Amino acid sequence: RPDILLVVLDTARADRFQSGGYDRPTTPNLAALAGEGVVYRKAFSPAPWTVPAHASLFTGQYPSLHRTDCGSLRLPDESRTLAETLREAGYRTVGYTANPWIGKGYNFHQGFDTYREIWREVPDGSEDTGATLTNEGVIRYLRWRRENRQARRQPLFLFINYFEPHLPYHPPEPERSRLLGPGRDAARVARLSRLGHPEEMRFIMGISDLTGEDLAILNELYDGEIAYADRRLGEVLDVIREGG
């Protein structure tokens, strides 16, 4: 029974990953991991937003069957989740989510022995939207487990949701400077790094006043967020490799 690590980089586009051919240095850790395993280039989410997509990920069902969507945001109690299946098979099931849409209020903790809602702990105004707190908890747990023989006897299912690539795009350093184009206006970057609801809806509806340069900066900030999430995931992978 192998240990299982399931990671979601929330709202991360497949075409921004180096393993998919992207020519910017956004995901070196995932690219290295991809080189050791299999990359599925024709895998598609069954839904375009968090709740139904994660419900399908956790149940293996289409949204038309689990019906966790705009009409009912709560995962039904009768749904059988991956965590429940693995726990019944003897696994220790542990989850960390920085996305409030898959919190306990929507029943996404079903089947987990431990489920930590990181989003509740992030300070207001923090550039980091939970990756630091997530990694502190995950790495502390993995290192404790490595030293605890009894804990190691039980296989582990670990789920992590990193929220960084989600709007607004405000990557910390060094990813911000590394992925921004040269000569970008600092005031404009600061303004765009706070862009969120309802501004993105204005853009979707075609009534936004965002310029071409604004969109270029947003693209670069988005790349920075993906690169930051990749760095944090790399820290977790390093700890796993340390343990063999």
Image (cartoon, grey):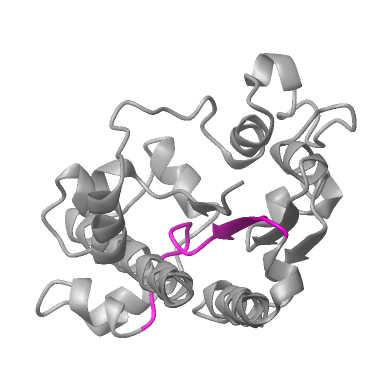
Residue 74 in the image, given as x and y percentages of width and height: 82, 37
Residue plotted at (74% across, 22% down): 66
Q: Is residue 120 visible?
A: no
Q: Quadrant of the C terminus?
A: bottom left
Predominant SS along the magenta part:
loop
Which picture quadrant has residue 184? bottom left
Residue 113 in the image, given as x and y percentages of width and height: 82, 57
Q: Is residue 11 on the magenta stretch?
A: no
Residue at the far right: name it: 77
Number of residue marks: 0
Which picture quadrant has residue 81? top right
Q: Is residue 170 on the magenta stretch?
A: yes
Point out the stretch of residues depicted in magenta: 154-172
Residue at the far top: name it: 64
Which picture quadrant has residue 94? bottom right
Toward the viewer: 16 or 212? 16
Residue plotted at (70% across, 79% down): 148
Residue plotted at (42% across, 38% down): 204
Residue 29 in the image, given as x and y percentages of width and height: 29, 65
Q: Is residue 77 visible?
A: yes
Residue plotted at (78% across, 25% down): 71
**In the displayed structure, does residue 193 sit left or right of residue 93?**
left
> With respect to residue 21, does 115 lie above or below?
below
Residue 216 in the image, given as x and y percentages of width and height: 20, 58
> With respect to residue 158, does 145 lie above or below?
below
**In the displayed structure, does residue 88 sit left or right of residue 186?**
right
